[in-house]
Amino acid sequence: MRQVRTTCAYCGVGCGIRAEVTGDRSVFIKGDPEHPANFGKLCSKGTHLGETVGLEGRLLHPMIGERRAGWDEALDLVAGKMRDCIELHGPDSVALYVSGQLLTEDYYVANKLMKGFVGSANIDTNSRLCMASAVAAHNRAFGEDVVPVTYDDLDEADLILLVGSNTAWCHPVIWQRIEAAREMRGTKIVVIDPRRTETAEQADLHVPVAPDGDVALFNALLVEMVRRGVAEEDAPPLPHRPAAGEKGGVGPETFAALADLVAAHSRMVTVFSMGANQSIAGTDKGNAIINLHLATGRINAPGMGPFSMTGQPNAMGGREVGGLANMLACHLGFSDAERADVAEFWQAPHLCSGPGLKAVDLFRAVHDGRVRFLWIMATNPAVSMPDAGFVREALARCETVVVSDVIVDTDTARFAHVRLPALAWGEKDGTVTNSERRVSRQRALFAAPGEARADWAIIADVAKRMGFAGFDWSNAVGVFREYAAMTALSVKHGKVLDLTDKAGISDGDYEAMVPFLWGGRHPMAGRTMRHVPVEPRTRAADPAFPLRLNTGRYRDQWHTMTRTGLSPTLAQHRREPLLEVHPADAEAARIVDGALARVVTASGKSVFRVSVTDAQTLGQIFVPMHWSDEMASGGRGNLLPDQSVDPISGQPGFKNNACQIEPVASDWRAFLLSGEAITPEYLGWWSRSAVAGGWLYELAGDGAVDADVLLPAGERIEAVDMARGMRRLAVIDRGGSLIAALFVTRTGQLPPRDWIAGQLGQNGAALPELLAARPSMPAPDRGPVVCVCHGIGTNLILDAAEAGAASVADVGRACGAGTNCGSCRPAIARMLREWRADMTPLKEPEVAQ
Ligand SMILES: Nc1nc2c(c(=O)[nH]1)N[C@H]1C(S)=C(S)[C@@H](COP(=O)(O)OP(=O)(O)OC[C@H]3O[C@@H](n4cnc5c(=O)[nH]c(N)nc54)[C@H](O)[C@@H]3O)O[C@H]1N2
Ligand SMILES: Nc1nc2c(c(=O)[nH]1)N[C@H]1C(S)=C(S)[C@@H](COP(=O)(O)OP(=O)(O)OC[C@H]3O[C@@H](n4cnc5c(=O)[nH]c(N)nc54)[C@H](O)[C@@H]3O)O[C@H]1N2
Ligand code: SF4
Ligand SMILES: [Mo]
């Protein structure tokens, strides 16, 4: 057994991991108690990383079309196509679309190739969909993309405002840190979000702002703080005195409660995330937040400041090395002086002359043929871009699409002419920078599988084949040293970013590198900061599409599910893509809980399972972004949003689109348990999720059900349950193990899936049990799983409540739920609250203070 210290593959919290490598492709994951981002904690996704390191579905050698190719042939082809395209159509006919999931070293090399040597800034990144508005807000306020706080400020704050952040699900370890601050010093927590998320349920105050109401709300807060003497009257230019009463849709009582909290606590941190950034007013939202901090002097001291949380593990590293089309490496812009310095440092023959195309415009240019060569790395735009139907059309038309990925068959890879196998997490080596500007090492745990190679090395090889000099590093540390040395240019141009002390780092020191911060704890102290007056801007109403569509994330899935979708444990939290809708909107549309419904926008439509919930505000619906063609025929959240972007940052407004909903009828509903993945395209609707040893499909369709197509060969047993209108089939292999099962109903309810899913590949169960989908001596039903680490369902938790457990910790002591990663603790807290509400006679709700 070998112990390796590395960093989590997923979110921008950047948790340190101690990985105990137990075999060729197996690893035991523990939090690193010494890493300053997490001090040993990990959430459900990090904890279950070990379930995603298998080689199933991996791309392990280069592919040209459907043919396996050698590296030489593939790289020659890519370099040749790129060179031809530049010669025939100019440098701007070539583009790279990269990702915050690349390492800093990969990102640096990609950016150097495009901006320095191809001579076009047509390299953009999925961070355009994620961080671009925060970057633009930082640039306007601070003159540089700098986060002016660290996680320590969360520990020392008395008030934390979470704006458009479902922290408990998306940055769970930060959420635990915030909860710890509440326990230690009574920190108050406010959640500003149109939906009542699990994070909002835990807050001292939930402010259900109207979609995109944030600028009006923060302007109103600023004016109120001036009125109360908390903010300086003449600190900000205040031409934006909000229209009387306009507070972003927030009612007077809630606004007063919020204003009281803000006025009372100078140690205030405002965390903002996608509900702020992903908006046609995203940059203004960032500045509205920063303005409040500047006017109240709440910045550059312990426990205070605006804090943009990054999404991806290396969103921040990508910003450092110039991954966005509108900047150069090392936080530099395109002034003559900056360009000249970069050209000299790289010895770059054709440094690009100005900014390139931002993601949405980039895919438009692919669509209309201005860009003819597109190389996509570590991102799945056919799923994750807005108006994904348009993006697919663009990819289908493009002369040359190259995809570097770790997975053989993604929705984007289907459009690739050339597929290049990259090293995945657990195999690659390099650095990432987290939300608080802390640089950590990712280290390889396993040998490279098949012919997979590091992203930076693939790019460097293509550059060399194109005849460019300056791409012959022999390892990742060589690239890192060059980047660190280049930050001398940021320093020269008065920026905070400075890694020059690492420019001479030895191979050994890089190997042993401990996490470090650039910029220190409060890098804006003593530097110039600007108020940027901002005015509310919202989308025009469209009577054809009366509802507002909001999109986002689930606790246990990561983006397009290419990795988390493989984990049976993580699948338990939410097996299907849900359309969450307020009861009155559901009723008006004749939509019922558990049935299917279609969401329609001007851009597209898709079908989801309905979940009726009063956590949604009237007039607003929510769907997840995660499901792809690989995982479902419906649930395709990104066919829905249009191409509108923030005019300053170019970031799409993913969270506020006009839509309508309608019921979807089907003759029958079924579930299929199968050892093999199938693609039941001919069915009306399907969605699959991982179970141990195979897949669980939820199906719906019209007409007859063709069991022969769905089920594999084997001994088939069948029962028809007339009373319940159900047909049940199970398929057994020679050894008596269950290899598939199909349950179909036209009128009734299907049985719970948990037990029978656990029988897949097993041969302990009797045939009648399999056909009943439950054991003859049933163990107590655990109910829907809440704690995925310990496999504990709602029923045990309610038992604990019944037996007197009064807190999440009590529940943990009683049954273990919530005691490992803690991601489910907000859900347990909600259950306890609901249980108590059921038990106690109704009384007046307490007023939040
Ligand atoms: N489990 C999980 N965690 C992740 C990821 C994942 O895929 N899964 N991805 C990572 C990445 S890349 C990112 S960017 C982060 C994202 O992390 P978050 O930003 O927390 O996640 P989202 O669910 O996209 O959106 C957050 C909230 O914004 C709210 N919102 C919508 N419109 C508005 C509005 O107008 N105003 C306000 N104030 N709020 C609004 C939504 O209701 C939603 O609850 O998560 C990271 N962590
Ligand atoms: N509707 C809606 N859409 C959204 C959002 C939203 O909130 N709502 N959020 C947006 C945001 S914030 C983000 S960040 C994006 C994320 O969207 P994407 O970036 O498209 O999502 P991922 O599934 O993370 O895609 C990463 C791809 O890289 C591959 N990969 C993993 N590791 C490596 C590696 O080391 N090298 C290479 N070459 N490939 C690798 C994975 O297999 C996968 O195919 O989605 C955006 N889209
Ligand atoms: S909070 Fe979870 S997903 Fe994010 S870095 Fe930590 S363990 Fe990974
Ligand atoms: Mo993101």
Image (tube, helix red, strand yellow):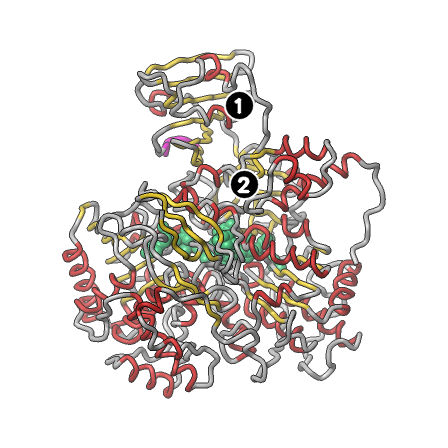
- Specify the principal SS of the magenta part: loop
Q: Quadrant of residue 842?
A: top right
The residue that label 2 is drawn on is: 578
Q: Residues within 10 Å of mark 1 (few under 14, many from 20)?
A: some
Q: Residues within 10 Å of mark 2 (few under 14, many from 20)?
A: many
Q: Secondary structure at mark 1?
A: loop
Residue name at image x 18 percent, y 59 percent: 75
Q: Is 137 colored magenta in this rendering?
A: no
Residue name at image x 65 percent, y 77 percent: 294
Where does ligand 2 appear, by image quarter? bottom left
Stretch of the chain drawn in magenta: 680-684
Asked if 154 appears above or below 542 in the picture, the reply is: below
Residues 644 and 377: in front is 377
Asked if 272 appears above or below 44 in the picture, the reply is: below
Whether residue 598 is visible here, answered yes or no, is: yes
| Disc 1 to disc 2, C-alpha distance | 18 Å
The residue that label 1 is drawn on is: 750
